[in-house]
Amino acid sequence: MRPVELFCWHFMAYPYLPDDFDEHYESGWVTVPNRLWDRERTDGLYQEYIDQLVYAEELGFDGYVLNEHHQNIYGMMPSPNIIAAALTQRTKRGKIVVLGSLLPLYLNPLRVAEEYAMVDSMSGGRLIAGFAMGGGPEAFNYNIPQPQARARYWEAIDLVQRAWTEDGPFRHEGAHYPLRYVNVWPRPRQLPHPPIWIPGALSLETMEGVAKRGHCYFLSSRTHGAATRMAARRFAGIIEQHGGKYHPFRMGILLSVYVAETDEQARAEAHEGVWYFLKYCLKGHLRREGRPLTQGAGVPSTSVRSYEHYLKNATLGGKQLGDTETWEELDAGGSIIAGSPKTVREKLWSLIEQAGVGNLLIQFHFGNMRADLARKSMRLFATEVAPALRRDSAALFARDYPELADTPVAGAA
Amino acid sequence: MSAAVKTRTISVAGHAVEIAEAGSGPALLYLHGFADVHGASSAFLPFHEALAKSFRVIAPAHPCCAGSDEDDDIETMDDLAFRYAETMDALGLDKVAIAGACVGGWIAAELAVRHPERVTHLVLIGASGLEVPDQPIGDLFWEAQPRNGADYSGMRRLLFGRDDAPEAVTLFPDSRGDMGRELMRYKTMRFASRIGFNPPYFYDRHLRRRLHRYGGLSLVLWGEHDRMVPRAHGEAYAKELAGAEFRVIAEAGHSPQVERPAETAALISTFLRPRAAARNAAAKAKPAAATAKAKSKAKAKPGAKARTSARRGRVSVSAKTGRRKRPRR
C-alpha cells in the first residue's frame, strides 16, 4: 500500500514590488531592474521562506521542492542547493527535491554531481535530484544557445549518473564535456544513486529520454485537466515501448493550492498573493502582456518537428495563465485551486483518479502572500485534505497497480 | 514570384540544401539574411528578380532555413563556412561573385578570408560578423519574442528603417496566426541561434584581422538607418577590405535589399560588371543586336577577372577606379 506523496513547493518570490510595477515594467524576468530590490525589507526573507518549508516537515509533508531561476522576481533561488543545504540542517525526515539544477548553465556538470552528492550525504540520503534544461529567460540570462542545449543537457545527465554509480577515476568521452578524470568525492548516500527527476512540457523527445533511462517524469505545466491525463497516458505508452511499466510514482505534477475554512474565505484571503503572482511573477513567462520569453522563435529549444506539432495544438498570442482575470477562469484551468478543504480534496482527488499520478508537488505560497496565511493554508491542507487523499490513493493504486507493493519507495535510503 | 525562379534541392555532405535560382548570365551566389528570401519569404523578392535580369542568381537556404536540413554538427561559424565551401563544390562554383545580407554577409566575408581565390567579388549588405566596441549588434532573439505575444514592431525596427513601412509589415506582421510564417521564423531563428546567439553575439572576434586575406573586389552597402548592425560595422569592413567601395543607401534600415530593392540591385549590378553596365546604357538607344553582343561579352568578364586576381594573390582592384593597387596593411 503506497499512498500519493505530497510535497510542498516554495518558489521564494520577491514580494516587495511597487504597486505600479505592471504599468512600468515589461517583465518580471531578465530585465526587471534589480534596483527594485529592497535591502532592508528583505532582511529575514529567506529565513521566513525556509521556516515555511520546515513547517511543512512538521505538518507531515513528504518533502519540499526547490528550483533554480536567475535574474527574476518569480523565484529567488539562483542556487537552490544553498537552500537545500540549509534544509539538511533544519529537517530530519522529508525528501529534498531540487527540481532542478539547470545543467546547460554549468561549465562542467560535475559541479552539480558534487553538490548533489553533498546534499545527499548531509541529509542522510534524502535528496531527489532534478535536472532541468532551463527555459527562455535562462537562455538570455546565461547566454545559452538553445538548439545545442538539449544535447548538452542529456550528455550532462548521463555523465552525472555515471559519476555517481561507477568507480572513479574514469574518462568521459562526449561531444560537450569530454573529461579525463571523473572521480566525484563525496559519493551520494543513496544506492544506486538519488532518484532522478526530469521536468518536461509534453514533448515526446523528453518523455522518451526519461522512459529509456528509467527516471521520473515531472510535468511542468501549470494548467490541469484533460491534458494532464493525456500526458500520463502518453508517458505510460512510451514506458511500455521501452519495455517498462508505468506506475504513479514514475510521474509528478505541479499544483497550486490555497485552503481556507470556506470557499469564499479562501478566495478572499488568497486574492492579493495570487494576483501578485499572476500579474507580476508570470509577466515575461506565462503572460501575454509584456515580453513573454518562455517559448518561441527567439529561444528555439525544441526541434522544428516538435515546434510544428506544438503550433498545431496551440493558440499563439492567446491568453495564458497570467492573463487570467477571474477565479472562475482559474478554476476552469485547474491552475490554482482555492477553496474549503472539501473543495480542494475533491478537485485533487479527481485529478489523481483521472491521471494516476503519484507525486503531487504543491505550491502554497504565492507572490507576496502573507506568511501566516500560507502557513494556515498548509496546516488545513495537512490536517483536512491530505489524510483522505492518502487513504483513497493507497486503495486506488493498490487496485490499479498491484505490482507497486513490491516496489521500493523512491528516495528511501 | 517570377515564373523563372526554379527551386531545387541538392545534397551537400549528406544534407539537403534548398536552392532558389533565377536568371542567366554570370553566376552570383546570394546568401540571405533575415528579411529576405528563405529567411522571411518563401519566394524571391523584387530585389532578387532585378538581379536575375543580369545574373544567374543562386540562393541557397542556410541549414534549417526553408527546405534545407538542420544539421547538429553546425555549432559555430567555422562549421558553417566549411559547409558553404562544400555547397560551392556541390554547385560547381569554383570561383564566383558572392553577395550576402546580414548574417549572409558575415558568411560571405568568412568564405572570402578562408578561400580568397574562390571569390571574385564580395558584396556585403548590412553584414554582421565584426566586433565593433560600443556599437553592439541588435538583439534579434529578444525581438523574436514579441511584445504582448504578437507585436513585432521591435523586430521591424531592428530590420527596417521604418517599422510601419509596407514591406516591413508584409514580412513581419503583428500576428502569429499564420502557421507557415511562424514556422519559417522559428527555423530561421533556430539557424541563427546556432551560430549567432553565443559565443559571441553574431560576430567572430578574429574576422577583422583576417579580412586583409581577401584581395578581390568588394562592395559594402549599408542602410542609412541600420539599427541591427550599426553603420560603424560597415565602415570597419570597408576599412579592412582593401579598395572596398562603401555606399550608404538613403531611407533604408538594415534591409536595403527589401526597402530599396531597385537601387540596391542597381548598385550591385554596376559593381559586378561596371564596364558592361556602361556599355548597356550606351547601347540602349541602339539596335537589339548590339545589346546582345554587349551581354555576351559581359558574361565572360567576371570569370576572367577572377583568374587574374587569383594568380596575383593579394593584388586587389579598387572598384571606384578599376585600377590595381597593393592592399593596405
Image: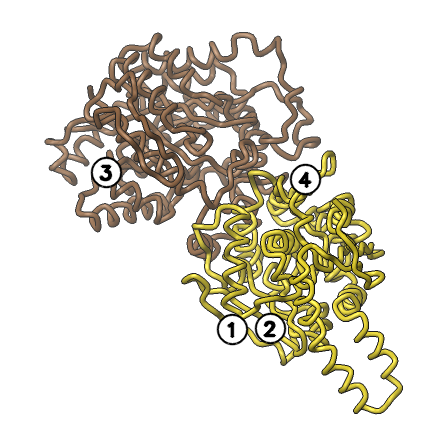
4 vs 2, front mark: 4
- A302 and B262: which is toward the camera: B262
Q: Colour of chain A?
A: brown
Residue B8 got which mark?
1
Q: Quick one: quadrant of the C terminus of chain A?
A: top left
On the question of residue A375 being in view, the answer is yes
CA distance separating discs 4 and 3: 46 Å
Q: Does residue A57 lie above or below A113 as drawn?
A: above
Q: Which residue is mark 3?
A: A214
Residue B21 got which mark?
2
Q: Does residue B166 lie above or below A19 as drawn?
A: below
At 18% across and 43% down in the image, what residue appears?
Answer: A245
> Marks 1 and 2: CB-CB under 8 Å?
yes
Check the residue under mark 2 and report the chain it is in.
Answer: B
Quarter of image, res A95: top left
Check the residue under mark 3 and report the chain it is in.
Answer: A
Q: Residues within 10 Å of mark 4 (few under 14, many from 20)?
A: many
B95 left or right, relative to A225: right
Q: Amino acid at mark 2?
A: Glu
> Marks 2 and 3: CB-CB under 8 Å?
no
Q: Amino acid at mark 3?
A: Gly
2 vs 3, front mark: 2
Q: Does residue A193 lie above or below A86 as drawn?
A: below
At 73% across and 62% down in the image, what residue appears?
Answer: B258
Toward the front, the furthest residue is B312
- Chain letter for yellow, please: B
Q: Which residue is mark 4?
A: B131
CA distance separating discs 1 and 2: 8 Å
Q: Give a yes or no on whether discs 4 and 1 share a subunit.
A: yes
Residue B231: x and y in percent read: 78, 46
Q: Amino acid at mark 4?
A: Glu
Q: Give a yes or no on whether discs 3 and 1 share a subunit.
A: no
